[in-house]
Image (cartoon, helix red, strand yellow):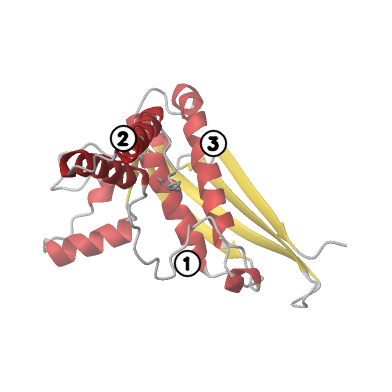
């Protein structure tokens, strides 16, 4: 008698194949015709189905977990959680991408404007500035995946960093970001179409560093025009940690 096989087939065709293989075995058993050709064909068919239904090996995780999951070390840390840093960057990028058409119509004047990362103030007192830079760079990476954003915004490196790279790699001291130097053929940049993406991170703490203390973190990003300091875009994110009453 053919025993039940613990298959986990998702498609109807796979289930039908298993049924046919079972019938083949049952028919051979009742007639007593255990010929190698019949049995061999049935075995091959069953082996193919088994191979199709099993998941491929994934190997060892080596401690790797999804970035959205929290670990025990994170649960015992009072600083803003990595998963919330990811959420913050996703929210800011999505809101700016959704608002880009309004900005293009009302504030960009139909031009492809230039955006540079401006000031980033970390006022938490306990979160590393590296965490904040992670959010900043992740926002840019997410925005760069949008064609609509790229058609309206050009992101540039900071002036000091670019000049240092040019001097080291090219042996020149030309200020390319100014785009108006004697060796540049690009017209001088109009400050009306140059913007800074500034950010701030705050912490509101109650209870000090006690185990039952409460921390409210607030992350804010603003797009500011260079010519008149007008804020044309604003996005914030906040998260609270503590022990419920």
Q: Residue furthest bottom?
A: 210
- Whole-angstrom CA distance, mark 1 to mark 3, is 23 Å
Q: Mark 2: which secondary structure?
A: helix
Q: Are marks 1 and 3 in contact (CB under 8 Å)?
A: no
Q: Are marks 3 and 2 in contact (CB under 8 Å)?
A: no
Q: Residue furthest right?
A: 245
Of residue 12 and residue 109, the one placed in the foreground of this image is 12
Q: Position of residue 179 (x, y in %)?
A: 24, 44
Q: Is residue 131 above or below residue 158?
A: below
Q: Mark 3 or mark 2, which is nearer to you?
A: 2
Q: Mark 1 or mark 2, which is nearer to you?
A: 2
Of residue 77 and residue 60, the one placed in the foreground of this image is 60
The residue beneath circle 2 is 24
Visible in this render: residue 113?
A: no
145 horizontally vs 98: left or right: left
The residue beneath circle 1 is 130
Q: Residue furthest front?
A: 32
Q: Position of residue 89 (x, y in %)?
A: 51, 49
- Whole-angstrom CA distance, mark 3 to mark 2, is 60 Å
- First in sequence, mark 1 or 3: give its number: 3
Q: Position of residue 137 (x, y in %)?
A: 42, 54
The residue beneath circle 3 is 95
Q: How many C-alpha atoms fall within 10 Å of the one at disc 1: few (<14), some, or many (≥20)?
A: few
Q: Is residue 155 above or below residue 165?
A: above
Visible in this render: residue 205?
A: yes
What residue is rendered at 35% in x and 27% in y?
111
Q: Mark 1: which secondary structure?
A: helix
């Amino acid at each position: 008698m053919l025993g039940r096989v613990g298959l986990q087939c998702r498609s109807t065709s796979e289930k039908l194949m298993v049924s046919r293989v079972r019938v083949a075995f049952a028919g051979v058993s009742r007639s007593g015709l255990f010929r190698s050709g019949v049995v061999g064909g049935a075995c091959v068919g069953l082996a193919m189905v088994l191979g199709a239904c099993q998941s491929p090996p994934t190997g060892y995780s080596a401690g790797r977990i999804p970035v959205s999951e929290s670990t025990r070390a994170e649960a015992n840390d009072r600083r803003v959680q990595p998963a919330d840093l990811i959420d913050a960057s996703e929210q800011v990028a999505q809101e700016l991408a959704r608002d880009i058409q309004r900005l293009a119509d009302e504030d960009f004047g139909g031009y492809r404007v230039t955006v540079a990362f401006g000031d980033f103030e970390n006022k938490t007192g306990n979160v590393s500035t590296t965490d904040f830079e992670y959010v900043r760079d992740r926002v840019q990476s997410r925005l760069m995946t949008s064609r609509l954003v790229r058609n309206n915004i050009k992101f540039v490196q900071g002036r000091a960093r670019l000049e240092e790279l040019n001097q080291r790699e090219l042996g020149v001291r030309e200020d390319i970001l100014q785009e108006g130097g004697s060796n540049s053929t690009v017209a001088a940049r109009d400050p009306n179409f140059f913007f800074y993406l500034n950010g701030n991170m705050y912490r509101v703490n109650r209870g000090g560093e006690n185990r039952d203390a409460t921390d409210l973190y607030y992350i804010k990003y603003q797009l500011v025009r260079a010519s008149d300091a007008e804020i044309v875009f604003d996005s914030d994110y906040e998260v609270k940690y503590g022990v419920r009453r």
